[in-house]
Image (cartoon, grey):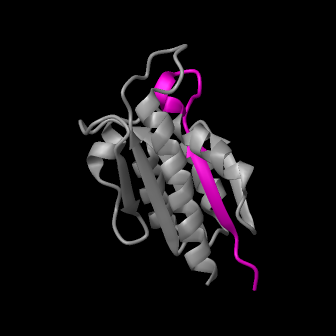
Amino acid sequence: MNSRRLVIGIGNSDRADDGAGPAAARALMLDSPVDTSIIESSGDPGSLIEQLTGSDAVFFVDACASGAAAGTVHRFAVSEEPLPEIFGAVSTHGLGLGTALELARMMGVLPETVVVFGIEAESFETGLPLSPAVASATEVVAIRIRDELAQLSA
């Protein structure tokens, strides 16, 4: 049986650290794990739920603003418990990732493995690049996702 593994980088690369998700996705694309699709997304809840359907393992990367230092990496195993409210409360993507994941859970399409990496942002200002701390964190997250995907394959 073939598994469908997916990495989704959520955000807007034109809004400074909101581009953390897409940057991490692009870092993974440079050395793409076998049998894993890697995409960038604006975070539309309907699209996210559609992507989840039929997947066995999904990793999300998104910027967040919980008050921790810029570049702090948060990891949430959403297949085990809901995404903390603070993560969804600061989303710049409409209803938010947490809402989309809970809708998927209620619809019975939440994959067996769902992990969300939140990268603490410094700025969401239009026209700015990633802050140095967030740029560094995207590389760390890409490595962590590669490692977790390798463990799933073992």
Eyeballing the image, is 139 above or below 4? above
Q: Residue at x 64, y 68 (%)?
A: 55
Q: Is residue 137 magenta?
A: no
Q: Residue at x 73, y 49 (%)?
A: 30
Task: Describe residue 65's horizontal placement relative to residue 59 as left or right.
Answer: left
Residue 4 seen in render: yes
Furthest toward the top, the residue is: 127
Question: To which quarter of the image does residue 109 belong?
Answer: bottom right
Question: To which quarter of the image does residue 121 belong?
Answer: top left
Return the x and y of residue 88 as percentages of the image width and height. Answer: 36, 43
Residue 109 seen in render: no
Q: Residue at x 50, y 60 (%)?
A: 144
Q: Nearer the viewer, residue 4 or 130?
A: 130
| Magenta segment boundaries in residue numbering | 1-19
> What is the total number of numbered labels drawn onto the structure image?
0
Return the x and y of residue 64 as percentages of the image width and height. Answer: 38, 39
Q: Nearer the viewer, residue 67 or 93?
A: 67
Eyeballing the image, is 48 above or below 37? above
Task: Describe residue 80's horizontal placement relative to residue 107 as left or right.
Answer: left
Return the x and y of residue 15 as percentages of the image width and height. Answer: 52, 22
Which image quarter holds the C terminus?
A: bottom right
Which image quarter holds the N terminus?
A: bottom right
Return the x and y of residue 6 as percentages of the image width and height. Answer: 65, 61
